[in-house]
Amino acid sequence: MSARSAAAGRLRLWQAAWVVARRDFVAVLFSRAFLFFLLGPLFPVIVAALAGGVGQQVAEETGNAQIGIAMETNDVDAMLASWERLRSRLGPAIPPMTALKRLDPGEPFDGRKVMEERRSNIAAVVTGTPHSITLTAPEGRLSRLQGPVSMVAAQAYDYVPPEDPRMTLQPVSTSGAQERSTRIKTAQSAMAMLFLLIMLLAGMVLSNLVEEKANKIIEVLAAAIRMDALFLGKLLAMLAVSMVGITVWASVIGGVIVLAGTEGQLGSQLHGLAPPGVGWPLFFVFSVVYFAMGYLLLGSIFLTIGSMAATVREVQTLSMPVTMMQLLVFFFANFALTQQGSAAELAAIIFPLSSPYAMLARAATEDALWPHALALAWQASAVIVFIRVGAGLFRKRVMKSGPQARRRPGKLRGFLTRLRTRNAAQG
Amino acid sequence: MHTEPGDRPATLSSTDGGAGPLAIEARGLVKRFDGTLAVDGVDLLVPEGAIYGILGPNGAGKTTTLRMLLGIIDPDAGVRRLLGHERPHDVSRLVGYLPEERGLYPSMKAFEAIAFMGALRGVPLKLGRERARELLASYGLDHAADRQIRQLSKGMAQTVQLLGTLVHEPRLVVLDEPFSGLDALNQGKLEGMIRALAAKGTTVIFSTHVIAHAERLCEQVAIIAGGKVPFAGSVDVARDRIPPQVRLETRAPDGPWRTAFPADARQEGRVWHFSLPESGIEPLLRALIEGDAGIVSLSIERAGLHDAFVSIAGEAAARALEAESGGGPGA
């Protein structure tokens, strides 16, 4: 193309994408719907907080589960004293013990009945004498409690302080096994966060072209710019909107944490995560980059699927299989994480949709940087291919006008038309 | 005018046989959709600066032809040249297009919508906004500049879109059914706008199924029916294809002089309608005078574009056209 025709020709891909992205970004950001978009993800946070509170309460209640002792008074005291002595050395292996009932000599006690009454906190009942105990508990718990309870009973009367072997404690910060395990935990957490954000945000792209189709703007755009510029512009606009959303949510959540004074608690939770292989600063950079890549990859597919839909209702129908597809990709990437170095991990890295997840997991577990450069180039190429294919399909399918009257009707439609014509003629 | 795909030339010239440069040149355009032939070897030559009409009923292939000319879709066969370029997108910024299905973002303000359409054709946003306000003011819509599209009437919104088609000052304006959906007042305004564009040297090509608009505006037309172009040329040539129509009223209802009427003469009471014979009207008049038929009135009218359309495209196409335009030939 000559310089003159270049000046008269279509906008370049990036210029056209910028025009579209700018319009879409401003249109979304200054719409009332954007407020709901910002508030939307806070509902799951509230639900999660509530669920966490209930869970904690349940955990606390479970943690307070006790073993009830129903024996003669002396035996109860001996058992409790024995438990007191052992608990400091055996820790959580021995659950708390409590006197359920001090029995008179010869007084019978039905431990099974107490368990069936489902009294709170009583996880098991110990009856009989320390020399001959009966442990009543659900089957799964019996095997767990059998050892500790028999130890408490054995030392109830015949207490002889055991002679522990001399032991020197030599703490290290971590072990290979522990580091690997905690880095996988970091990788899983990061992948889960990435999945959550992409699932929340990429779905918006599904209905993104419906507006253009519903408002008949699509032909104006198609006449002026390349279809892939339209796709790219829309994706970039929604990515930018998503970034704004993430920034707002992070700020709000951070503010709430600071206001609630729970930053220490959060810090200790984060402290439980091992530093990623590439280090925290780079890991955050990779998180943003892989989010963008994951968003663009999935978004380009969603945009294509959505562009084939004629109405919002069709888009809604499509959203279920699309969500399932996201889940499958996430499960695949998670599976690959547990198979590091295997063909499954390589497949997860190569398959474009799971690649951002797999590579973020790799950033958490490995310190090498060059695979990320390769993977990002690969993912960017896949984005370009996806956009090109999607735009091509869209252009081919949507931009056909054609004479409706002269189109060959389908068999069913043709049959119905003939039937109607015949009825009308007879009527 | 129809040529088979194999007959089309390998290259295109950029003039219409030396008469002047061409804004659009298309030869043997063919397009199929799912095996259905939508456009079947269309040829078009649109001189620069002309107002050119494409006439045809819905489904004739007008929109598909325009989309192929603009590069929105590619032809399956045939060649096209827009403002001297074989690739329509090479002159995208010199072309304005108003599609048949109008569309604007409802939440956009009128001036922003025009500026956005300019930005799509390479006009910087700031300049586009300035031009948008000027254009709106020049068409008496300055009061609507800051109103959202959804708040405008249909006619106003359509004008806004048309202004968006013009904001980048194109050399060629393509309008697909620009009059549809407009009331008579706005149709008149639009005709004025088209004439003003042509006066500035802009080429305007528009499709329509209302013959009256084409007859009033166009120097040249293409008649399209069933995906083919049976006629393309000046309106005068189209009208000259059929002889002038004679209306003659006699005092006497009948007489031996009736044998002097041409074979196609149709009698309604004492009024006779027929095409002007090649030998002229004089022999008939002589026979009527000698037979004492008594001539009450006589009018000879040149055929209108509607008659030409019927003659060229056939009765069926004409009936379809009339049905879509919601009335008779003058609608």
Image (tube, coloured by chain):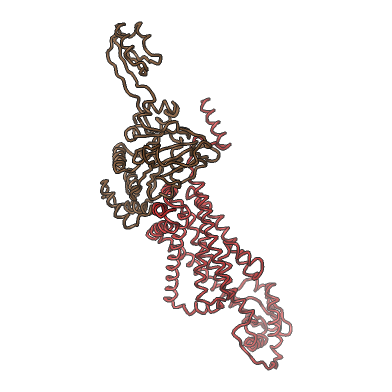
Chain colours: A red, B brown
> In the rendered image, which quarter contains the N terminus of chain B?
top left
Can residue A37 be seen here? The reply is yes
Which of the 4 image quarters holds residue A57? bottom right
Give percent across and percent down for residue B121: 38, 52
Q: Which one is in front, A170 or B201? A: B201
Which of the 4 image quarters holds residue B197? top left
Give percent across and percent down for residue B149: 34, 50
Vertical position of residue B183 compared to residue A43: above or below: above
Q: Is residue A318 left or right of residue B98?
A: right
Residue farthest along the right direction in this orientation: A132
Give percent across and percent down for residue A404: 49, 37
Q: Which one is in front, A366 or B247? A: B247
> In the rendered image, which quarter contains the C terminus of chain B?
top left
Write the residue at 50% across / 68% down: A289
Q: How many marks?
A: 0
Vertical position of residue B149 compared to residue B60: above or below: below
Give percent across and percent down for residue A277: 57, 76
Q: Which one is in front, B142 or B62? A: B62
Write the residue at 65% across / 65% down: A344
Can residue A67 be seen here? The reply is no
Q: Is residue A96 left or right of residue B315?
A: right
Vertical position of residue B243 compared to residue B104: above or below: above
Residue farthest along the front direction in this orientation: B18
